Amino acid sequence: METTKINAPFEVITIKKQSQMKEIWRRFKKNKLAMTGLIVLTVMVLAAVFAEQIGTYETAITLNVKNKLQNPSWHHVFGTDGYGRDLFLRCVHGGRVSLFIGFVASIAGMLCGGLLGMISAYYGNKFDNIVMRTLDVFSAIPTILLALTLVAALGQGIFNIIVALVISRIPAFARIVRASTLGVVDQEYIEAARAGGTSDLHIMVKHIIPNVVSPLIVQTTMNVSSMILQTASLSFLGLGISAPRPEWGALISEAKEFMRIKPFMIIFPGLCIILASASINLLGDGLRDALDPRLKS
Amino acid sequence: MEKLQPILETKNLKKYFNVNAGILHAVDDISVSIMPRKTLGVVGESGCGKSTLGRTILRLIEPTSGEIFFKGEKIVQSKSARMREMRMKMQIIFQDPYSSINPRMTVSEIIAEYMLFHKLYRSKAEVWNRTAQLMNTVGLARRLANAYPHELDGGRRQRIGIARALSVNPEFIVCDEPVSALDVSIQAQILNLLLELQKEFGLTYMFITHDLSVVKHISDEIMVMYLGQCVEKAPADDLFRNPRHPYTKALLSAIPVPDIRTRDKEIITIKGEVKSPINPTAGCRFAGRCEFADNRCTQTDVPLTIIGQNHLCACVRAKEI
Amino acid sequence: MKETLLEVTDLVVKYKTDLETVSAVNGISFNLNKGETLGIVGETGAGKTTTALTILKLLPERVGIIENGRILFEGKDLLSLSERDMMKMRGDKISMIFQDPMSSLNPVHTIGAQIAEALKLHNEKNRTKEQLETRVDEVLEMVGIPPSRKGDYPHQFSGGMKQRVVIAIALACEPDLLIADEPTTALDVTIQAQVLMLMRELRDRLQTAMILITHDLGVVAQMCDRVAVMYAGELVETGTLKDIFTGERHHPYTKGLFGSIPKLNGESKSPLSPIEGLMPDPTDLPAGCSFYPRCPHASEQCLLKQSDAILSSTHTVRCRLFGKEA
């Protein structure tokens, strides 16, 4: 008899947790635009992941001057570039780089900035002051300029670009998380947890993170699109991904000289960027509405 | 017979805050002692420092100076590890049943939190068992174990807060306005619950409130605070029958009594309003609003003096008025 | 013979959203004579504030729906008045004091300007600017604020003083009816006493009829002539102050409310006799008497719709226990 009593609440708890996720998914599904965003993004991510199966990286970078500057056809859906490489394949492989950088930089920025913001707000006072003023200095520098400087200093390459982008994003994330944490640390349940003799780490993990995570998820998602745009800008300026590796921004940069005669060369990678960032933003909007506790009832 | 030791004692406890305008004397020289199984009621208007006092005693706010003894042990200097152990003996119930529980946790998770953190039981199953038992004790239906707080009303949420406080088997509980946010019929339910729990588990309460009829109902002894200081302290019945401090008198007279016979009684209204205790000057802090004030009141601080059995009052004219 | 000022008959108000329908007020009727004070007592969600907002026609648009009923003010049906005519009534003939003095004042205007604004809106006497200013001074003096402070902003006042300003605005045009929704709940007890004294004095001086909404029976006892006890959108008991506060024959809910209050002269630490259970869900009210799930005297008859039992010319109780005398 004891055992049934013991086990009962535990099982039901897990069920309830699942149903909460289900509830969020149900609300998300109702949003047509967000679903479109999710589908488009999923297709693009899948294409990036299975890029090697669509056409090898070798093919995407091998020069084939005979075929240069061909218009889109059944054989080359997006046409070919100035060196005769298939533009579709280059866009697919470029997406691999762009999306990878976008997601990794956003998540890393969210983790670093978020953690900094949370700790800063939680301990407050002097520590908070030092952290936030330092970040103010960083955010006074235009993002692209900061990234440019960092890439110039650290050198080109995917890793360095990510580092540059993460650093430029930390202040924004820190500020968002700090603001929402400040709203949470004032709540009496934080004081209650302290009165219960729990540790700071426990309070942050159990009480603060769950209450600041939804705006953060939304922000991170939205941020992916701006990361993609930044990467593209950097590459366009010649400081991003170096040839022959394709990347959406780099593709546009390469297409500059043929812009008048073969506009499709600039249109297709441009479309990729627009599609990716638009679908991510729609997804983010949908997530925000689905996660907003005010709509729950 | 062995002399009973107070479960909680403070000596000249002070908490000052630095604010832009100066130093705010939130708790100024408070000495109390509470005997086991008794309730000390702390009354005062908003801004008198009563909540700060409760939180300072639990060291949720560090005191500026003074001593706190819990069962004879000094806890002001206690290391954080020792303090964490002490926290299990000293608990708090909060005023706002909405902000005092995490909206993202279920009822059973909230109640089990401290037990899981301190690993009070060998297995999780035992913790859930104890949670169910606690829910029973405070009168929460078992089917609510997996409900989220937003599905519940204020009274039930307050019961969750009480169950969470009880989960670590405390001996002393600071009740910080636990019924102020509740409707009268629910308020009575919670007050009855607190009284039952006190009897059943031999709890000691420090009951902070602005509601005089509530404090009268639940306390053995009452302390009246004004701008961070204790102005009068006496056994509950004695205080209500024989208030000596002009502020206490005004407070008691201001309560709207639900009895039509008292409708036309003279209410002692005190002029002006509570000032904030920033950089207070010497003398009685109530003097500016007091109709009996004379120059003795504003020259030097007025100490608490014994004016009757267990009856303390900080008024130079306590005997005359 | 006293003149009737306000007559509310069979008022039914619902809040309708896509998700649910909240039955806030379910068929209440009462009247108010000139110069009289009616206390409406009840707990959170009983429909007290909704009743007040309905009289002023300030229910949230589209959501708050008046399904039935009639509100006669000086013989005029308020519900059939146009929004334009209603605006003339508000502030001039009927005004309201809200619970929270902090949010009912505009932080960016001086209090003098806010009082003058109320006067200008209903400037039938065509007062000049100077006359308006003198009136502002008068009104401030009336509520015990030195007129020299009229250039101050709300944040420079304490809670009690702000509530005085709110009262000054409400009474500036000397309305016939003042609706006060928990006017002192946010205030400390000594300040509450000051504000209640002020309201009582002004009411007597200006001969204003008042509807005082509160959950505090103590406030009712000190302020009102008649009392209506509200529960789940219904008036379960109405009567004079004496009818409600004395005698044995009451609605079980009224008894429960009195039993829930700790008595100042009672024994310390003795258990109270609260009402068990919770307010019913206003989206799903029980059939018949809405109090029966919590009522110690509930029986099968309570499942039927209850009608008012008339105990005396002033005292009615909506409970089957008194049905025989009806």
Image: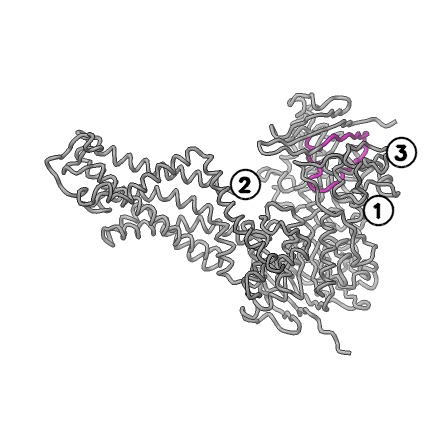
Q: Secondary structure at mark 3?
A: helix
Q: Looking at the picture, do discs 1 and 2 lie on one chain?
A: no
Q: Quadrant of residue B4?
A: bottom right
Q: Is residue A268 magenta?
A: no
The residue carrying pointer 2 sits among few (fewer than 14), some (14 to 19) or many (20 or more) residues within 10 Å by Cα, namely few
Magenta segment range?
Answer: C26-54
Query: In the image, which is nearer the foreground, mark 1 or mark 2?
Result: 2
Q: Amino acid at mark 1?
A: Asp
The residue carrying pointer 1 sits among few (fewer than 14), some (14 to 19) or many (20 or more) residues within 10 Å by Cα, namely some
Left or right position of C173 against C266: left
Q: Is residue A99 above or below residue A194?
A: above
Write down the residue under mark 2: A296
Where is residue C212? Give x, y as percent: 75, 37
Q: Is residue B189 above or below residue B4?
A: above
Where is residue B246? Give x, y as percent: 78, 57
Q: On what subunit does the disc labeled 1 rest?
A: B
Numbered badge on residue C303 = none
Q: Is residue C27 magenta?
A: yes
Q: Secondary structure at mark 1?
A: loop
Measured in 3D between alpha carbons, the distance from the residue under mark 1 to the one under mark 2, in whole angstroms, is: 44 Å
Numbered badge on residue B259 = 1
Write down the residue under mark 3: C325
